[in-house]
Amino acid sequence: MGLRGTVPLANGFNCNEQVQVPGSFASVHLCYGYSVNRLRCQIHPMAALKKETVWQVFHHCLHISGIERRRILSVCASIAESSIKGLGTEEIPVESGKEDNAYEDPLPYGLYPYLMPKHVAIIMDGNSRWAEQRGLPSTEGHRAGRIALTEAVKLSCKWGIEILTVFAFSTDNWLRPKTEVRYLMDLFQFVLEDELETLKRENIRLCVIGDLAVLTKSLQTSIVEVEEMTKNNSRLNLIIALSYSGRNDIVQACRRLARQVEDGNLKSTDITESLFEKELETSCVGDFGSPDLLIRTSGEQRLSNFLLWQLAYTELYFDDSFWPEFGEAQYAEALRSFQRRHRRFGKRVCNKTNGTINF
Amino acid sequence: MAVYSAFKSFINPSFQDSASFIRNLVYQLFRRFVIWIVSAGSVPEHVAIIMDGNRRYATKRKMKKLKGHEFGYNSLMHTVRDCYELGIKYVTVYAFSIENFKRSKEEVETLMNLMQEKLELLIEKESMVKTYGIRVQIMGDLSLFPQRVREAADRAMAFSRNNDTAFLNICAPYTGTQEIAQAVEGVMKAGDLNEKKISAEDIERHLYTSDCPEPELLIRTSGETRLSNFLLWQTSFSLLYATPILWPEFSFRHLVRAVLEYQKAYPFLQKRKDQLLTLVPHQHHD
């Protein structure tokens, strides 16, 4: 039950494409075996190959399968005919390769790299309830939540997710007890200063969206500073929604368009959906402001005024664990659930078996 | 002939007839009992439904895929009736998305014919609209529909304009993003373009659902958990309930289960609403 199709591999090669091995008369083609961590390598022609040539062929397989980007645990060679003397089907374990690029780490079991969502949004809910369950004050819950967020960012980088949006503080959260709000604001300030070096080192770009005018001046300055210093980073776009409300986002976009109409640059009849989308706060990541997957922890099945327009076709995933408990296992399960889903965007997708996978 | 068979069954009722009569009676009594129990708790005033799974149902029953939409319509009618009996005053359903125009010509044509036929059925004398006093509203960019469907929709809306006991909003052809975009356009056209004065209420006033409360419960059938561009603004605080049941199989017991889920989450929702209204900090859990 392997996967078929013209799935892109590395260096411009495709799965199932027959590729000549340089320096030999053999050619290979790779197809996914029973799991993403196994590639089946088929060698042509069936003439007798010396053992050295076989190794040459395997090294070429590693090269075209993208071993620099992901570690393939084993390459299983299957020789189609038994006319090859002395060689049979062997599984040759692959060496680990270069460790300097974190993309090399394999994805958890059951996750396919080409089905990973580009943009993941998370509503980090449940800090206070987690703390209450353990008899701790809610401030401890938020501190544990911060650690969980760091972990989520690290995993997103590792697994190749390009944009991560997190709901840190909603406009409704201003109604919480003053001490808790003050603690949270101090925590945000501290985290910004503390994590700046990590963001620079890991090549992460930070954007903060929301009604920043109600925050303290020092926090606003820190935010602007960090955004400025990380604006050229490209590995991961981390969007933090602070004092954010989906409806206010739409209202501010409406106001911006109203200003343009007032100035005469735009007619009110020219307003289209794509034009409107450009004015939303998530346009800091260009055209990819709509998440592919939304995860909400703590079991609540609501959106709570987060990213309303952008969630039109987002897959929603509700997790029962509280945010401080959300770790690699839960994140992988959410991604597995996403990869199993069939996204149609209102149309019908025909899954013809002509070698292409539509998703 | 009909008179003779009626006379015959009266004189000599078969065992099967009386059994099914008793079964029906028991079912009706049980149903009323369940409605009475459920109505003791809070029942959502407005329920939104994404009716998904018609084609899958037809495939499951080994029928032609487009027949599934007929069964979907029947399911809609009895679900709407169940909602009103439970005390849910507003029902909004997602009948047709603007994205659905990209489907095959055959399917779109079938859906247009079905919609025209059913809209015309609604305005017949014995229809549910009269029985329950339902005001029917077709929400969406009606200019995208063919003329005949548009006229049927206008007739249905005109026929039920004076009803106010219950409300049925049929979203066709609709997308949440188009609704918000046209609301923004409406705000611009309304005149006062002083940008500082534009607020959330202005946008709400121009939405299609401006005279309805927000849906407290959103039900999506066939197991998918996504909004598919339905009521994006209005569902920001609604409980999202996804069930793997296909839409033509959705029945009274599934609706009851959804309402019970809502009642489970209700205390939390109510606390939030009170907070927002009074704007006084409360100690609460989250």
Image (cartoon, coloured by chain):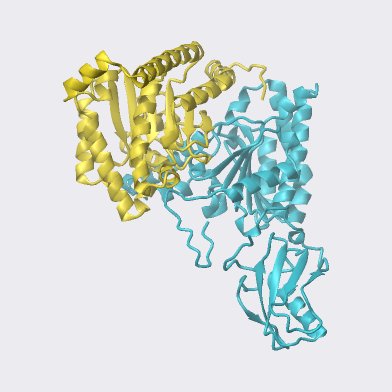
Coordinates of residue A167 in the picture (x, y in percent): 63, 37
Give residue A138's quadrant in the image: top right
Q: Quadrant of the N terminus of chain A?
A: bottom right
Coordinates of residue A279 in the picture (x, y in percent): 47, 46
Q: Is residue B112 positioned above or below A356 on the image?
A: above
A258 relative to A290 in the view: left or right: left
Give residue A258's quadrant in the image: top left
Q: Is residue A199 positioned above or below B41 on the image?
A: below
Q: Residue at x 59, y 49 (%)?
A: A340
| Residue A192 appears anywhere in the view | no
A259 relative to A95 in the view: left or right: left
Q: Colour of chain A?
A: cyan
A111 relative to B178 in the view: left or right: right
Q: Is residue A355 positioned above or below A233 on the image?
A: below
In the image shown, does A231 or A29 lie closer to the viewer?
A29
In the image shown, does A233 or A37 lie closer to the viewer?
A37
Coordinates of residue A134 in the picture (x, y in percent): 80, 24
Q: Residue at x 65, y 57 (%)?
A: A112
B144 relative to A120 in the view: left or right: left
In the image shown, does A27 or A345 lie closer to the viewer?
A27
Q: Residue at x 41, y 23 (%)?
A: B213
In the image shown, does B56 or A315 lie closer to the viewer?
B56
Q: Residue at x 37, y 30 (%)?
A: B209
For the view shown, which residue lies furthest in the front direction?
B12
| Residue B263 appears anywhere in the view | yes
> How many badges with numbers are in the image?
0
Judging by colour alone, the chain drawn in yellow in this rendered image is B
Coordinates of residue A126 in the picture (x, y in percent): 69, 30
